[in-house]
Amino acid sequence: MATQLTLLDPSIFADLESKIDEEAQVRDALTQIVQKLQRTVALAQALLARVHSTPRARYPALVKQAESAVKEQVNVIEELNKVASQHPHYKYNEKWTRAVQNAISTTLYCAWLGGFAPSSGSEQGGEGKSQTEYSIGRLLTLEEVGAIFSDRDAFHFTIEEYLQALTELTPELARLATNSVTLGDFELPLTISVFIKDVFSGFQLLNLKNDILRKRADAIKYDVKRVEDVVYDLSLRGLVTRPEGVSADTEMKSGE
């Protein structure tokens, strides 16, 4: 008896071709939005880079400009959400995750310098300090970052993206510690030292599964060391107040 041949239905491949074209269109649309996001991030980074040559008294004006740049990122993220929300997150998130990390990083940096101060409270902080001065050294939580980018929490930032952004903040602050001394600000390195040590301690509590993130978190210890060297040098020269009863010789021995 003759064997009956079964032919494949050509519509199967026609359907696949249609899906390939659809995915290509989605990727192209996402690429254009991500490129726009990268440009807004670059603007915010350029503004924040000025802090290395800006006295602390002029931070408020610089931070205000940086806030405006971050708000441009918010607009692009909203545009990204309109496209991304129509498709599975896992399918295309590699297109935007790096740009989103950078956007979060600039937001964290801006807030650390005194930006995005809480709306509650008066413009004067405790003991006559301005709100901006009072906010120096503040770390936004993942939820606070999400609130800045979307009051409706429409676009979800992942914990990993937040942590990656945080590892990008510490080397910038370590660099700022050195440059602030050049500008005659001997107290800022102390604030930065405490902050970076706290961040490093926080990462030590996490059981990180991502190898890249774990390595970047471990590298924060080098930022801690850089800032410690700055603080030690200032202390040795008597440019910052040492705790009572602690001498330079004592500090040197403890550092050994």
Image (cartoon, rainbow, N blue to C red):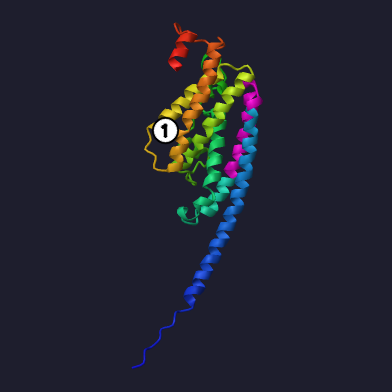
Residue 60 appears at what percent x and percent y?
62, 25
User: Left or right of 249: which side holds 99?
Assistant: right
Q: Residue at x 55, y 20 (%)?
A: 230
Predominant SS along the magenta part: helix
The quadrant where residue 211 appears: top left
In the image, residue 26 above or below residue 231: below
Q: Secondary structure at mark 1?
A: helix
User: Which amino acid, mark 1?
Assistant: Phe
Residue marked by disc 1: 203
In the image, residue 128 above or below residue 26: above
Image quadrant where one finds the N terminus? bottom left
Magenta residues, as a range? Answer: 52-75
Residue 116: tell me if it is visible. no
The quadrant where residue 112 appears: top right
In the image, residue 6 above or below residue 221: below
Residue 65 sits inside the magenta stretch: yes
Residue 102 appears at what percent x and percent y?
55, 40
Q: Residue at x 49, y 78 (%)?
A: 10
In the image, residue 98 above or below residue 243: below
Q: Residue at x 63, y 42 (%)?
A: 40
Q: Nearer the viewer, residue 108 or 143?
A: 108
Residue 196 appears at what percent x and percent y?
48, 26
User: Left or right of 68: which side holds 97?
Assistant: left
User: Left or right of 3: which side holds 65?
Assistant: right
